Image (spheres, rainbow, N blue to C red):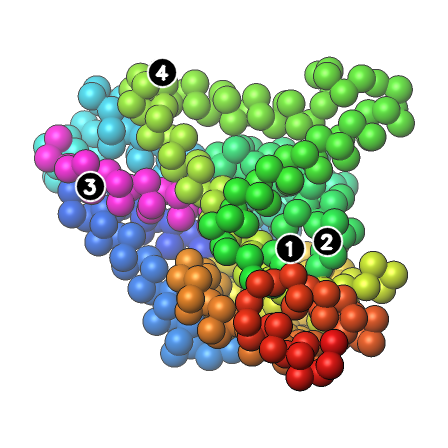
Amino acid sequence: MSIFHYLKYFLFHVIGLCALAALVAGGTAIPIGFVAVVATYLIGDAIGGDDTSTPRIGYPSILTFQLWLALPLLATIVFASVWSVCQTDVLGFGAWVTGLSGIDVLASRHATTPWQHGAGVLLTGLMIGMIGTIPGHELTHRTWDKVSMLVGRWLLAFSFDTIFSIEHVYGHHRYVSTVEDPATAPRGRNVYFHVIISTIRGNVSAWNIEKKRLRRAGRGAVSPYNAVIRGHLMSALLVAAAWMAGGATAAGYFILCGLAGKALLEIVNYMEHYGIVRDPATPVQPRHSWNTNRRFSSWTMFNLTRHSHHHAQGEVPYQDLKPFPDAPMMISGYLTTIVVAMIPPLWHRLMTPKVMAWDRDHATPAERKLAAVANARSGMAAFVRQEARHGV
C-alpha cells in the first residue's frame, strides 16, 4: 500500500493553512487568498482529470485522524479571522506571529479595509464549509464512534448546522430525491431560494426527528437530551467566544462567516441532487445523485465527490467509496459546479440537458411519470416543451 494514498488527503489541510496565512497577513492578502483558493480548484479540476482508483487502505485509523485534525485547523482559522477585526491583540496572537515571522501583522491588520474584511468573510465561510462541513459530514455518519460524532458536531457548530448530524443522517438519506427531502432541489428552483427553504425545512425536519426519538425514550422534546437544542447551544458558545474576543463587531463578523459556510452547504445540496426524482418505493441507488470523479476535488475533499456511492451506502467510509463512472455526472469538480450554480442562467443552461438525459438514461418508468410532474411544475419552458413533445 503506497503512502501516497494517505498523504494525498493532506492536500485538504494545505488548503486550510494557505487560507490561514492569508487571514493572518491581512490587507490585500485576504482577497488574494480567496481568489487563489477558488482558482486552484477551478484549474486543478480542469486539468487534473478523473481519479477512478480504489486503493485498499491498510490503516484506516490514519485517515480518521486526518478528519479529526480538521477541528483544531478550523478553530485556528476562525480565531485568526475573528482576531483580524478585533481592536485588541487577543491572546497576544499578533505579537507572537510578528516575533515568529518578522512581519508586523498588527500593522497589516490596522491597514485592512472594510472590503478586504468582506473578502475575509467569504474566505472564512469557504473554509467553514470545506474544513468544517466536509469532515463533519463524514464523521457524523459514524454514529457508532462517540469521538468522531463529538468532533463532527463541533465542526458543524461553526456553521450553525449541528442539526445536519440529525436531519442529514436520518432524514436526507431516507428521503433523498423525493418531495419529502428538504435538501433535494426540484427542477426550476433558484439556488438562492433553495438556500433559504432548505435551511428552514431542514431545521423543522431535524426537530421532528429528534422529538420522535425522545418520545420513544419517554422524554420530552424540550430537555437537555434534545440534540437539536444542545447543538444550537454549541454554536451560541462560539458566538459568545467571538463576543468576548472583540465585542459586537467580532460576534457579528463570526455570524456572517458561519452563515456563509451554511449557505455553501445548501448550495452543495442543491447541486448534488438538483432535478433528480426517485420513486419512494425504490431503494436509493447511485443513479439518484449527481457524481464527479475530478481528481483535485476528490483528494482535497475526502472523496465527497463520490456522492453516488455515498448515498447508495451511507455507512461506507470515504476512502472505500467507489467512483461509479456510469452514475449521472456533475458539470465538473465541486467548486467549479458551485460557481456555476451561483449563476442561475448558466446553471439552467448547462443542467437542463443533463436532467433530461437523466430521465432518458437512468429513470424507471415510475420515475419518468414523476419527472413529467416535476417538469410541469418547474415553470421552465425547456422542461414544459419536453413533456409536450412526449404528449404528456
What residue lies at 39% left-to-right and 76% top-to-bottom? 46
In the rendered image of this protein, does residue 307 appear above or below residue 30?
A: below
Amino acid type assigned to the residue bearing label 3 in the image: Trp
Predominant SS along the magenta part? helix
Q: Which residues fall within the magenta stretch?
A: 110-130
What residue lies at 72% left-to-right and 70% top-to-bottom? 372
What residue lies at 57% left-to-right and 43% top-to-bottom? 197
Amino acid type assigned to the residue bearing label 2 in the image: Val
Q: Is residue 194 left or right of residue 247?
A: right
What residue sits right under mark 4 in the picture?
Answer: 244
Q: Residue 57: where, in percent of width, then height?
A: 65, 64
What residue sits right under mark 2 in the picture?
Answer: 179
In the rendered image of this protein, does residue 161 appear above or below residue 221?
A: below
Q: Mark 4–mark 3 contact, CB under 8 Å?
A: no
Q: How many neighbours does mark 4 have within 10 angstroms: few (below 14), some (14-19), or many (20 or more)? A: few
Q: Residue 382: where, in percent of width, then height?
A: 56, 75
- Cα–Cα span, label 4 and label 3: 24 Å
What residue sits right under mark 3 in the picture?
Answer: 115
Residue toward you, 155 or 121: 121
Q: Residue 67: where, in percent of width, then height?
A: 55, 48
Q: Mark 2–mark 1 contact, CB under 8 Å?
A: yes
**Any magenta on residue 286?**
no
- Cα–Cα span, label 4 and label 2: 43 Å
Residue 131 bears which disc, if any?
none
Residue 184 bears which disc, if any?
1
